[in-house]
Image (cartoon, grey):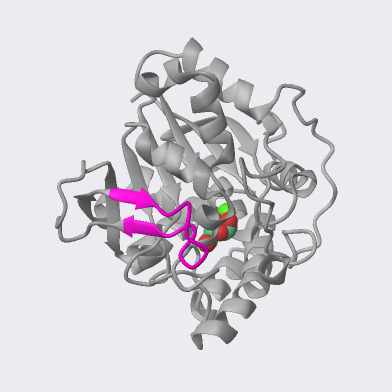
Amino acid sequence: MAKRKIIIDTDPGQDDAVAILLALASPELEVVGITTVAGNVPLSLTQKNARIVCELAERPDIKVFAGASRPMVRPLVTAEYVHGSTGLNGPDLPDPTMPLQDQHAVDFIIDTVRAGAEDEITLCPLGPLTNIALAMQKAPDIIPRLRQIVLMGGGCFEGGNVTPTAEFNIYVDPHAADVVFRSGVPVVVIPLDVTHQCLTTAKRTAAFRALGTNCGIATAEMMEFFERFDEGKYGTDGGPLHDPNVIAYLLKPELYETREVNIEIETMSDLTLGMTVVDWWGVTDRTKNATYCRNVDDEGFFDLLLERYRALP
Ligand code: RIB
Ligand code: CA
């Protein structure tokens, strides 16, 4: 069966790292490239962290690109308070030796989609949508060529995690999110409503450590660091593991309960900036522009993650 070609756009971030490792461990997927964006930490660190993770997986062949260093309109907001000063705090991992690609991430996205067949490339954004929106604006011809966008971002029933109404990835660059959700590309949304069901409990973290592999142990150490902020905030055993759900959706969509909805992005209000306004009950006649994931089989998600990790070094 032909591998599904994906570009992961990411702001590593420990949860991004787990998503990248899951993708690299899954033979159904071909990671055509990893494009990086400023988000959890500045671009100088996200592009370095993506290469650190590829080398942890012993995949120095993966092409990593640097993209936008700031949102389209807003000033950059980062999240070292969650992810630590490097963005990958927890394990002690060596600096990368694999190269960063010279080409800008936005141009890589454009060139790759143009060179591929129609409906061949799936974009997997795990951070602010700046690179995706810039590519769409620079080359609108790629929009009808894209197969799908499966992104982590937004929320509805769980509210926000960076403001009462906004999730971080959308909040950092609401204007980019507005471009993406208005583009007409089929978008699958993995929101906080789903990721808050995927907690890195002590038992689950121990299972990664028990793998005894470099990737398993490093992931346990990332989880133990990453979760501490959210455990304090939510009073839970473990924190939500957000980004790997994007890859898990590609591998086992049956783990997710979805509904076709309209989503619009708040880009004006200071109070609700970055809110994903989800028309869950269809009370408007707005076009249904998104497949919204509402629930997940969290046990199935972690079983998949652990099973695939056995293929990693
Ligand atoms: O709100 C969670 C999202 O913001 C995740 O993608 C996390 O990595 C951060 O980018
Ligand atoms: Ca992320």
Vertical placement of residue 22 versus 233, above or below: above
The residue at 35%/27% (across/down) is 147
Judge from the rendering whether residue 268 lies leftward or rightward of residue 66; answer left or right.
left
Main secondary structure type of the part rendered in magenta: loop
Q: Residue at x 51, y 44 (%)?
A: 175
Q: Quadrant of residue 85?
A: bottom right
Q: From the viewer's perspective, is 186 left or right of 166?
A: left
At which x and y percent is residue 272? 46, 64
Magenta stretch: give its range. Answer: 263-277
Quadrant location, the N terminus: top left
Frontmost residue, 97 versus 271:
271
Task: Give the x, y percent position of residue 38.
Answer: 68, 47
Comparing 58 with 253, the one in front is 253
Relative to 215, say whether 10 is above or below: above
Q: Is residue 248 above or below residue 238?
A: above
Tally of numbered tags: 0
Q: Quadrant of residue 223?
A: bottom right
Q: Position of residue 139 (x, y in %)?
A: 51, 18
Does residue 121 belong to the magenta stretch? Answer: no
Residue 174 at least partly seen: yes
Q: Tell me: 142 left or right of 44.
A: left
Whole-percent x and y of residue 186? 31, 35
Say which residue appears at 68% left-offset and 34% top-offset. 67
Q: Where ligand 2 lies, by image quadrant? A: bottom right
Q: Is residue 303 visible?
A: no
Along the viewing direction, whichever of 230 and 139 lies nearer the viewer: 139
Depicted 102 relative to depicted 160: above or below: above
Q: Which residue sits at x=15%, y=46%?
A: 285
